[in-house]
Image (cartoon, helix red, strand yellow):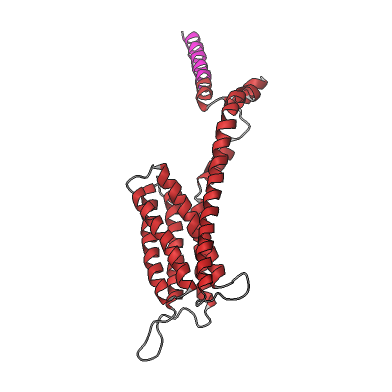
Amino acid sequence: MILKGCVLYPLCSPRNKQRCSRLWKISYGGLLKIVTGSLLTFYVVLCLDSGMVLMSKQVPSRFMYPKEWQHLTMFILLTLNGCVDFMSKNVLPQRCVGLEKGTLVLIIYQLLLLMVSHAKDSEGVELHVHSLLILVVFLLLLVLTAQLWAPNMCHLQLMETFLMLMMGSWLMQAGFILYRPVSGYPWQDDDISDIMFVTTFFCWHVMIDASFLLGIYGFSSFWYHCYSPSLKLTGPKEAPYYASTPGPLYKLLQEVEQSEKEDQALLFSKSSP
């Protein structure tokens, strides 16, 4: 009776399983992009005292705050990318990976155009920082474009992950270099040693990000090869009712239902004259 109850009535109720499956299917990456892009958009709008004015009131009128408008466009693109990811995974009846990849490639194309024009008004250290960032975005664009024709190549997926990690870490470093230097003193554009150290920091980012990605891959590979076979061998001995797949359970229920139908048919035949 106890064993029968364990098989027919699993510990996790169907409602909890359904909730867990729904939570697992939520596009947390898309939600994170939406929240981050929205917060950064509001920050850009609110950081200017006069507001996001597009053109001045002078004659002839001129465009105002070009860099801030480019920052705002980048953050809006990030928010739209998160919306597409969330809709593809949680709103549409079937997930469309091609839509997600195509939207990401289009956004990276626009990001590259914005970065190229963004660096034209820069010089010295700021120009060098943006040039290294443009290099990463360009390589990422090539990888994402190649993935449109070869989406299942693991080498391209690994390169995409590394370049995404590199772009994010270098953006954080660029923020500290340009706006809040760790030393408290601004970088000097006429000092060649500052420009050289920017390149050195970029190389350090490449090595650290590559080591971080290699460590994750090595740990995952070690865990899979060392612990996954042992779990498969010892799983049925320690918890036999967890090892049962839905197939045998459904077969058992079908056998019970079939036996009940046969009993009812037998009783009906006996009761009939």
- Residue at x-position 49% and y-position 80%: 51
Tell me where residue 74 appears, x and y as whole percent: 44, 66
Name the foreground residue: 46 vs 262: 46
Image location (x, y in percent) of residue 126 = 48, 72
Report the span colored magenta: 254-272
Q: Nearer the viewer, residue 144 or 217?
A: 217
Is residue 256 within the magenta segment?
A: yes
Give yes or no for residue 213 being in the magenta stretch.
no
The spot of residue 163 in percent (x, y) is 46, 54
Above or below, 68 against 198 in this view is: below
Residue 185 visible in rendering: yes
Residue furthest bottom as drawn: 59
In the image, residue 55 lies at what x, y percent?
Answer: 40, 83
For the N terminus, give its image quadrant: top right
Q: Nearer the viewer, residue 167 or 189?
A: 189
For the residue pair 58 and 165, the one nearer the viewer reads as 165
Instruction: Look at 41% across and 61% down and name the residue there.
Output: 135
Residue at the limit of the structure toward the left, as seen here: 149
Q: Quadrant of residue 239?
A: top right
Q: Is residue 187 left or right of residue 114?
A: right
Q: Residue at x 54, y 58 (%)?
A: 204
Question: Which residue is at a point 59% across and 23% down the rendered structure image?
Answer: 233
Number of numbered labels in the structure image:
0
* Residue 142 sits above or below residue 51 on the image: above
